[in-house]
Image: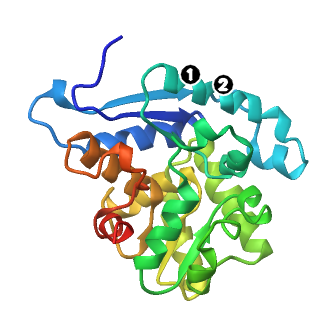
Amino acid sequence: MMKSLRGEVLGIVGGLGPLASAEFVRTVYRCATWEREQDAPRVLLDSNPAFPDRTTAFLAGEEHTISPLLEEVLHGLLERGATRLVICCTTAHHLLPRLPAELRRAIVSVPEVIVGQLRRARGRYLMLCTRGTRYLSLFEREPGWSEVADRVVFPDEADQDLVHDDLIYQIKRMADPAALAPLVLALRARYGADGFIVGCSEIHLLANALHGGVEHPGCIDPFLAIASSFARDAAGTGHGVGERIPFLPGALMSASTA
């Protein structure tokens, strides 16, 4: 089996949806640097759109329809050489506590990264996530959430439906993210927020359309943070996988070791 020339190998559970995970791979390579193509970091993407809809399954109490499929993909990525795992679906993180310990140790938790980003951010941010993530209180269950909760605003029920149906699921149906950007800006203004949180992998496409794929004070994007941190670790300029430091951007990563 071919090995990475730069040590770290990122395994991605994709297809949830496929455009979001493909965009995440694009972000990883846009963040990475190399002199020769052969020195670029190795990424393993298992894009399987056949997974049942996470929001529908979880709100119906049917976690069993997804959990074994997720475990199978995660184990397969580790067997093929992945050193870190990313589940490119925030709602699917509802299953993390149910996964075996050896899988949980390798997974970069998107909610954990968001909490870390919010600790360093200033202002109030509008949460853009699926109905499943919202009504399962996924973020509220994350350790440290109480420290940052006062700077997060969730949309009301009607606007939550708007985010789910007219933003996230339109992107899943291949709508142009740039064409949906005015809706995000209007929601942000409606709630008096200084920015928005990428609480769903589809919103990462929208964030890239708005901010050109670079960090921006008006956007908390865990997928960009993970990509940026992995690129540094793969190049040998980060902390290294053995230290179990969450993937966080620049200042956040140094703060987490303080």
In-front residue for pair 182/82: 82
The numbered disc on residue 62 is none
In-front residue for pair 100/224: 100
Q: CA distance from mark 2 to mark 1?
A: 6 Å
From this view, report whether residue 18 is shown above or below residue 191: above
Image quarter of residue 38: top left
Which SS class for mark 2? helix
Residue at 37% across, 50% down: 243
User: Which quadrant holds the C terminus?
Assistant: bottom left
Mark 1: few/some/many CA within 10 Å (<14, 14-19, 20+): some
From this view, report whether residue 226 is shown above or below residue 234: below
Q: Is residue 227 visible?
A: yes
Q: Residue furthest right?
A: 60
**Residue identified by numbered label 2:** 72
Q: Residue furthest top?
A: 1
The numbered disc on residue 76 is 1
Residue at 69% across, 40% down: 99
Q: Position of residue 7 (x, y in %)?
A: 27, 32
Looking at the picture, which amino acid does disc 1 mark?
Gly
Residue at 68% across, 37% down: 100
User: Which quadrant holds the N terminus?
Assistant: top left
Looking at the picture, which amino acid does disc 2 mark?
Glu
Q: Position of residue 116 (x, y in %)?
A: 47, 69
